[in-house]
Image (spheres, rainbow, N blue to C red):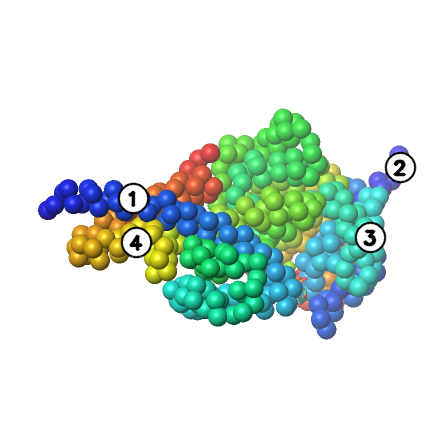
Amino acid sequence: MDFDFFAGMFAQLLMGLPLTLNLGILALLGGFSLALALNLMRATRIGNAVASAYVFVFRGTPLLIQIFMIYYGLAGFGFVRQSFFWPFLREPYWCGLLALILNDAAYTSEILRGGLRSVPKGAVEAGRVSGMTRFTVLRRITLPIAIRQALPAYSNEVISILKSTALVSTITLMEVTGIARAAVSETWRAVEIFLCAAVIYLALSLLVTRLSAWVERRLSPWQFGVTP
Amino acid sequence: MSLPSTALSIAGLHKSFGSNEVLRGIDLSARDGDVISLIGASGSGKSTLLRCIPMLEIPDAGTVTVGEDNLSPEGGRLTRGQESVARRMRGHLGFVFQNFNLWPHRTVLQNVVEAPLFVQKRPRAEAEEEATALLEKVGLAEKRDAWPAHLSGGQQQRVAIARALAQRPRAILFDEPTSALDPELVGEVLKVIRALADEGRTMLIVTHEMGFAREVSSQVVFLHQGLIEEAGTPEQLFGNPSSERCRAFLSGHFDRNR
Ligand SMILES: Nc1ncnc2c1ncn2[C@@H]1O[C@H](COP(=O)(O)OP(=O)(O)O)[C@@H](O)[C@H]1O
Ligand SMILES: [Mg+2]
């Protein structure tokens, strides 16, 4: 084992970590906002159809193809090149981030929808019958229960998006995987280098798992036999 | 001495679900201190009737009065103004569901203080003190910090009763409060409701517990296919029902329980 090589490689790959985290966190924030909007849209019939079609398309196609379509495909449209967004859509960073946001929104909107649907009808009725306004029911009953229910599935989505950021290395972004690929083409020590990259992703996943277990325990103590 | 005043009343109540006409003109009223039992076959509209009072179901026609407030919704929906009257009416009613419907993410005490704090905006110290006393009354003082999921059905229903009482309601509505319980847990809940009757609480109780209804009610109402087929004192209705349908329903019931 060549420890110096490993240590050097880690140091090099960690330079890509800020970009990986930047993409992951912004994709989650953007995706969650869009997912919330998609769920609110579902109140109307047309909105519901649009949201369903959106989810169908973005869950039904590979993220890699979504990235390519945005990065290589959009430039093919004249109006995109004329538009205000072109300075952004020309940049691989913004294309990659946009693809991640759109993809994350599709999955997150389904997770959120599942959470909302799992709220017992009786709990909502008990709120209404005690004289609460619709807003108070939402704030005190529906959302707290929905978010608690959605949390385990959502933590999977967080891990999934953090790993998915690796795909934007295909459009020249130098996040952890991008740096690894560049290093491989220089040194041809693929196994060692990708192993180092994998360890970094594993550590991130572990962190998220721990964090979500902690939040879950705080939010739903009755499921863990914790006495308040 | 003046007569007790009317706590709640229902007049000309109609309700359909699609083409299924479930309530076909119901008139009923309860004075303060009345305990009215609603009996009838499954599907006769008892739950729908009870749920129309706090507008959990919106009647198609008719008037519901609770204390000073009344509503006569039209077209199966409430206007914005009616919605706020409905909220006020709900504030004066307690509702106990067949399936308890406690809030799973709140402890026993939090369930009981929720409406006093977040609807009635009472001071926390006062609300908690009153809630503690109510939990003591239903025999669950030591469970105040437990989660609903960790309680038996009978305990959950007793918390639900304490939660209803915490609103200081003019009347309490019970929809088959013991039907979801294991037989050995029915008694503890009936005992609590009986104590409330003894205190002079105004209650409307949908129940299949005929012995209990006979014992606590000031009036018993037999519902058949969305109409009140017969109403009277427990002695009249259980002892000598005038309606053939009521007689058949009761004999079927007592046979089944035997
Ligand atoms: N939300 C609803 N939607 C459609 N039909 C309903 C609904 N609630 C009750 N019903 C129907 O109304 C009738 C009376 O129901 P219900 O009031 O629950 O009777 P009970 O409580 O006496 O058993 C039944 O035929 C039932 O199927
Ligand atoms: Mg019923």
Disc 4 vs disc 2: Cβ atoms closer than 8 Å?
Answer: no
Q: Which residue is mark 4?
A: A177
Q: Which residue is mark 2?
A: B2
Q: Is mark 4 within 8 Å of ligand 1?
A: no
Tell me which residue sits at (53%, 64%) in the image. Answer: A81
Q: Are marks 4 and 2 on the same chain?
A: no
Between the residue at mark 2 and the residue at mark 3, the CA separation in whole angstroms equals: 27 Å
Between the residue at mark 4 and the residue at mark 2, the CA separation in whole angstroms equals: 85 Å
* Residue A56 image offset from top left, x and y in percent: 49, 68
Q: Is mark 2 within 8 Å of ligand 1?
A: no
Q: Earlier in the sequence, mark 2 or mark 3?
A: 2
Mark 3 surroundings: few (<14), some (14-19) or many (≥20) residues within 10 A:
many
Q: Which residue is mark 3?
A: B71
Q: Relative to B192, is A184 above or below?
A: below
Q: What's the residue type where badge 4 is placed?
A: Thr
Disc 2 vs disc 1: Cβ atoms closer than 8 Å?
Answer: no
Rendering quarter of residue A47? bottom right
Disc 4 vs disc 3: Cβ atoms closer than 8 Å?
Answer: no
Tell me which residue sits at (74%, 58%) in the image. Answer: B58
Disc 4 vs disc 1: Cβ atoms closer than 8 Å?
Answer: no
Q: Is residue A15 toward the left or the right of residue B170 in the image?
A: left
Secondary element at tag 4: helix
Q: Chain of mark 2?
A: B
Q: Chain of mark 1?
A: A
Between the residue at mark 4 and the residue at mark 1, the CA separation in whole angstroms equals: 10 Å
Q: What's the residue type where badge 1 is placed?
A: Leu
Tell me which residue sits at (46%, 43%) in the image. Answer: A220
Q: What's the residue type where badge 2 is placed?
A: Ser
Disc 2 vs disc 3: Cβ atoms closer than 8 Å?
Answer: no
